[in-house]
Amino acid sequence: MSLQLESNINPDNPDVPELKAFIQRNIPKIAQPLAGDLQWYSPHAQLVPESFKIKSVEKLASNRFKMLYQFDGHIFSPCLDLNENFTREEQVLFHVFPGRLEFELIENQQPSPADEL
């Protein structure tokens, strides 16, 4: 599964600080897909707004990069007496193509009971 983000970054020689700044400015567009399905933690888990931070961007090849990021989640369920915060660090690979960045997302949706049968 991939996530595309329109950009005007030169794919021939992308600059790491420029990429990091561009992605950070566009976090509201990509935070939820990058955080994935938080149902693995709890059916009540939610992404904490504005907690998404890019820790590093590393060049792997001419137009291929690895991004390490961090986000916070919150689980609240009064019936279960839960009011917990958690922090996750994840990484994602992405490519710089003409007119876009393409992130290689790992699908992490919780399987349904039908999938288990």
Image (cartoon, helix red, strand yellow):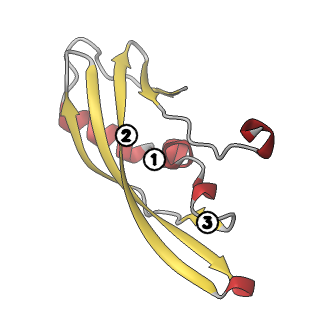
Q: Distance between the residues labelled 3 and 2?
A: 25 Å
**Which residue has dot 3 on it?**
45
Callout 1–callout 3 Cβ contact below 8 Å: no
Q: In this view, does 93 lie to the left or right of 28?
A: left
- Tell which of 72 and 24 is nearer to you: 72
The image quarter in which residue 112 lies: top right
Q: What is the secondary structure assignment of the residue under circle 3?
A: strand
Find the residue positioned furthest to the right.
Answer: 114
Is 2 displayed left or right of 15 in the figure?
right
Residue hosting label 1:
27
Helix, strand or loop status at disc 1: helix
In which image quadrant can residue 63 be found? Answer: top left
Q: Is residue 70 above or below residue 103?
A: below
Residue 16, horizontal then vertical, whole percent: 19, 33
Classify mark 2: helix, strand or loop: helix
Q: Residue at x 59, y 73 (%)?
A: 75
Q: What residue type is labelled 3?
A: Ala
Give the residue type that dot 1 points to: Ile
Q: Marks 1 and 3, Cα distance to the nearest angstrom?
A: 20 Å
The N terminus - image quarter? top right
Name the quadrant of the C terminus.
top right
Q: In this view, does 87 lie above or below 67?
A: below
Q: Name the residue: 19% across, 18% down.
A: 61
Which callout, 3 or 2, points to the residue nearer the camera? 3
Q: Name the residue under label 2.
A: 23
- Could you say which is closer to the camera, residue 79 or residue 105? 79
Mark 2 and mark 1 residues within 8 Å of each other at the beta carbon: yes
| Other residues around mark 2 within 10 Å, as few (<14) / some (14–19) / many (≥20) | many
Measure the alpha-carbon separation of dots 2 and 1. 6 Å
Mark 3: few/some/many CA within 10 Å (<14, 14-19, 20+): some
